[in-house]
């Protein structure tokens, strides 16, 4: 069967067409600047050259239509007819408390996703636009919603409640939800597979370190804690997001700088993290490494603060799971950045974590890097959220 996986943003749309039998990616691509001047589709069919199509795209309907045209095109297409697409799997960011697993989309599900927009105002409306555009262009094809929050719905209450007046939870559903759930699920399952053990018998910490970064404690196959919260701002230091801080800082900075609550929120989401801490060098770890090599002290501080925070979270999940069997690194930084991984493991040496530094120096490969006498198995497991979405979509049919 063939599944089209869609990850729709407010002005962008990422897609992959996956053959679920072989799990091969037949084609993937990205539409950028939808609804703005300079719309462009970059289509990458497997085994063929990429195609860049620059044409005005007023809305997501037109973008989806162009993606379908590219998939069935005589020259750069990978299928001969639209009817070969058996299902569409959509990444949906917020499923709230309503969704603890992927679901087939119907009117009711769409209404729920819309209502949950209050908790994810930047993401859920865009996801819904993508769903509607696919429904319009592919009538009758089953569509599934795979939620970023769903895997974390197994957290115990003590892990998801904040120390706030209880009425805010009752009235506004203010609680920890967690994100990147599809990745945490996929990586923890794959980590267990790689060591030939049942995930149900393991205590796994997954460190998803990308532009956005989150960490989770997966005990016996279920998430028991995670670092992101009501929104994807909490927890680790990220590319441009602050992660954890003293909540009183918001009012303090707002007053000092004359910023509204919304403006402070923008600073915390867009101008903080590695970018902010490094004094504006970059949110990209490759630029940070280059700046450190050139003697930039702020860049060094940024990286050290980042690594320390990751290590502290990992150690705290020993409490969440009463021990740790596996630590798995994933996503852009986790898969590619040896310096971050090794510094994090150095912080954990007191727990008996030992890695073979040569084995650990990989880029984007699956590797078990801990030594035989390490107390915890340390590995790198590249994530594959699109494949996970395709698998969950097929499972629903
Ligand atoms: P997103 O959250 O956007 O999906 P990714 O998981 O792709 O992010 O991670 C992007 C980050 O990964 C980049 O900002 C960069 O810092 C880091 N990264 C990617 N490739 C490398 C590399 N070869 N070496 C070091 N860091 C890398």
Image (cartoon, rainbow, N blue to C red):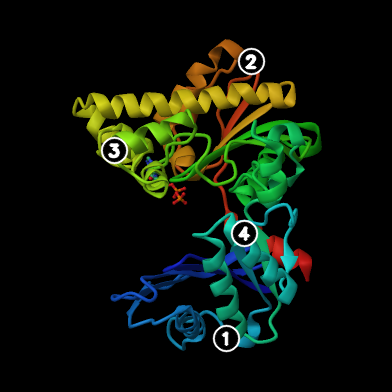
Q: Is residue 45 left or right of residue 299?
A: right
Dot 4 or dot 1, earlier in sequence? 1
Give the x, y percent position of residue 37. Answer: 29, 76
Label 3 SS: helix
- Mark 2 Cα-neighbour bin, 10 Å: few <14, some 14–19, many ≥20: few
**Quadrant housing residue 143:** bottom right
- Mark 4 Cα-neighbour bin, 10 Å: few <14, some 14–19, many ≥20: many
Give the x, y percent position of residue 345. Answer: 51, 22
Q: Residue at x 66, y 42 (%)?
A: 175
Q: To which residue does mark 4 refer?
A: 387
Label 2 SS: loop
Q: To which residue does mark 2 refer?
A: 373
- Mark 3 Cα-neighbour bin, 10 Å: few <14, some 14–19, many ≥20: few
Q: Quadrant of the C terminus?
A: bottom right
Q: Is residue 201 left or right of residue 3?
A: right
Label 4 SS: helix
* Residue 21 appears in the figure: no
Q: Report the Cα–Cα distance between label 2 and label 1.
A: 56 Å
Give the x, y percent position of residue 275. Answer: 32, 39
Label 1 SS: helix
Dot 3 or dot 2, earlier in sequence? 3
Q: To which residue does mark 1 refer?
A: 137
């Amino acid at each position: 069967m063939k599944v089209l996986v869609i990850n729709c943003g407010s002005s962008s749309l990422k897609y992959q067409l996956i053959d679920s039998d072989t799990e091969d990616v037949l084609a993937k691509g990205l539409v950028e600047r939808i609804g703005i001047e300079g719309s462009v589709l970059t289509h990458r069919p497997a085994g063929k050259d990429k195609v860049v199509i620059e044409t005005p795209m007023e809305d997501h309907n037109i973008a989806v239509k162009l993606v379908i045209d590219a998939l069935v095109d005589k020259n750069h297409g990978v299928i001969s007819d639209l009817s070969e697409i058996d299902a569409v799997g959509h990444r949906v960011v917020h499923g709230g408390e309503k969704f603890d697993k992927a679901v087939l989309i119907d009117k009711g599900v769409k209404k729920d996703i819309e209502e949950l927009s209050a908790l994810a105002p930047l993401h859920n409306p865009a996801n819904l636009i993508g769903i509607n555009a696919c429904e319009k262009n592919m009538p009758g094809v089953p569509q599934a919603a795979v939620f970023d929050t769903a895997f974390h719905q197994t957290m115990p209450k003590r892990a998801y409640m904040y120390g706030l007046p209880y009425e805010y939870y009752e009235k506004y559903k203010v609680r920890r939800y967690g994100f990147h759930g599809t990745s945490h699920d996929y990586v923890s399952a794959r980590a267990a597979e790689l060591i030939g053990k049942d995930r149900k018998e393991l205590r796994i910490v997954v460190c998803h370190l990308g532009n956005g970064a989150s960490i989770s404690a997966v005990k016996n196959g279920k998430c028991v804690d995670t670092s992101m919260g009501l929104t994807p701002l909490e927890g680790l230091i990220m590319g441009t997001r602050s992660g954890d801080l003293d909540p009183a800082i918001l009012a303090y900075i707002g007053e000092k700088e004359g910023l509204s609550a919304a403006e402070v929120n923008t600073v915390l989401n867009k101008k903080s993290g590695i970018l902010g801490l490094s004094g504006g060098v970059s949110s990209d770890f490759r630029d940070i490494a280059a700046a450190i090599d050139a003697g930039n002290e702020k860049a060094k501080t940024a990286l050290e603060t980042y690594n320390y925070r990751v290590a502290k979270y990992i150690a705290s999940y020993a409490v969440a799971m009463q021990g740790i069997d596996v630590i798995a690194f994933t996503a852009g930084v986790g898969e590619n950045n040896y310096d971050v991984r090794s510094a994090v493991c150095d912080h954990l040496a007191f727990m008996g974590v030992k890695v073979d530094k040569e084995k650990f120096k990989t880029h984007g490969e699956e590797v078990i890097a801990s030594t035989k006498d390490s107390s915890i198995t340390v590995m790198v497991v590249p994530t594959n959220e699109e494949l996970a979405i395709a698998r969950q979509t097929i499972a629903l049919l």
